[in-house]
Amino acid sequence: MKDIDYGKIIKRSWQLTWKNKWLWVIGLVLATFGAGGYSGSSGGSSNSSSSNIKLPGASPSPSPSNIQNFRNQTSYVLGAATNFLKSWFMSIPAGSWILLVLLILLFVVFMTATVWILTSWAKGALITGLNIADMDQPVDLKNSSPGGVAKIKDLVIFRLISTGLMIGIIVGVGIIFGLGFLVQLAVPVLGVIWLILFGIVGFLALIVAIILFSVLTIYAERLIVLKNLAPWEAWKKGLSIGRHNLLPTILMGIINSAIGCTSGCVGIIALLLVFALPGILLIFPMFNGGFHFPGIGQIIGIAILVILFFSINLLMRAVFLVFDAGNWNLLFKEIYKEEENE
């Protein structure tokens, strides 16, 4: 296939994204319900050391009898709490627990279905809207939303197919591992070899499956929305296109990830710098001369800053999702055009 001009795709996608701000509304739906953000966690560790050196004025070390009394009191409190919880648990009829579990499952299913429907509409509307924009026609919710509404069912069915197949692969790998443990009980050496061999194969199979499913989803969703293919036909066609164009797809994904990480980090740093001064001005009086509980004005001010911070961050994420979808739309058009010509 011909070389892909990624610079041209990125430039055109950004033009479409910036010019058609109604698409940001659809991006907000995806940013809220369908796409995660970058997050990091940092942890600290503390260490303690024991020493026989006593500092002047330090309290004397607790005696063994005091330590034992503390342990006895702790055990008594924990035992009483455990007995109370056990009695409370046993006092509720088994039917009530079953009903509670069923209600929780129904709630989870309802929320999952709701999110799937919303995100399917948003994906369909965004793909439609970007396609209209690429034809240099004005875009708004009125002409982009119907493309999402019409494809909700097909996109949900496609998602069910992909989810079912992925679960099947995971269960298959799990069964193979389970057989390995059974073999290990009968023939330990052979079982260890089995687990190591299929552990590597199973891990690689999962990685390959995740990559292929991610790639085919990009094309299958656009085949459903733009080419009106049925979900299963789109799945097969998307897999075929993805396999034949794996390298350009992965390169586009790397470019999108790099832009997303860079813009996300820069955006967060910029927001922190912008909100740092007003945040300090609101928080500093609380610790001036000792801690003071914040007044109503301070609480409202801090709440406004927090809401603004997360709202702007969500909007930036939404804009990037529109830009990201534009990149995939344009890449899909180039690749599909070549597929038709072959």
Image (tube, grey):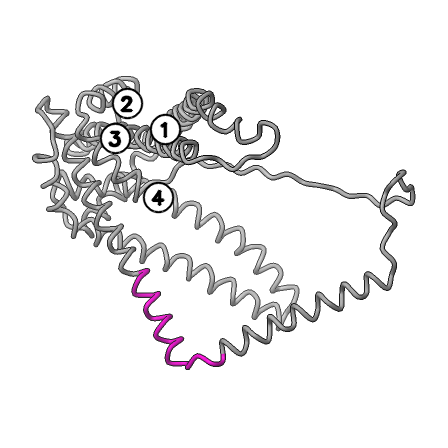
Q: Are marks 2 and 1 in contact (CB under 8 Å)?
A: yes
Instruction: Give whichever of 243, 230 is nearer the camera.
Output: 230
Which image quarter holds the C terminus?
top left
| Amino acid at the residue labelled 2 | Ile
Q: Position of residue 65 (x, y in %)?
A: 86, 64
As drawn, is 58 to the left or to the right of 197? right
Secondary structure found at label 4 = helix
Nearer-N-terminus badge (3/4): 4
Residue, disc 3: 322
Residue, disc 2: 4
Residue, disc 4: 212
Residue, disc 1: 251
As drawn, is 90 to the left or to the right of 291? left
| Amino acid at the residue labelled 4 | Leu
Instruction: Give whichever of 225, 261 is nearer the camera.
Output: 261
The residue at the point 56 percent across, 70 percent down is 182
State how far apart marks 2 and 3 are (Cα): 21 Å
The residue at the point 66 percent across, 64 percent down is 189
State how far apart marks 2 and 1 are (Cα): 10 Å
Q: Position of residue 336 (x, y in %)?
A: 19, 33
Q: Are marks 2 and 3 in contact (CB under 8 Å)?
A: no
Secondary structure found at label 3 = helix
Q: Which residues are magenta?
A: 90-108
- Classify residue 305 by image quadrant: top left
Which image quarter holds the N terminus?
top left
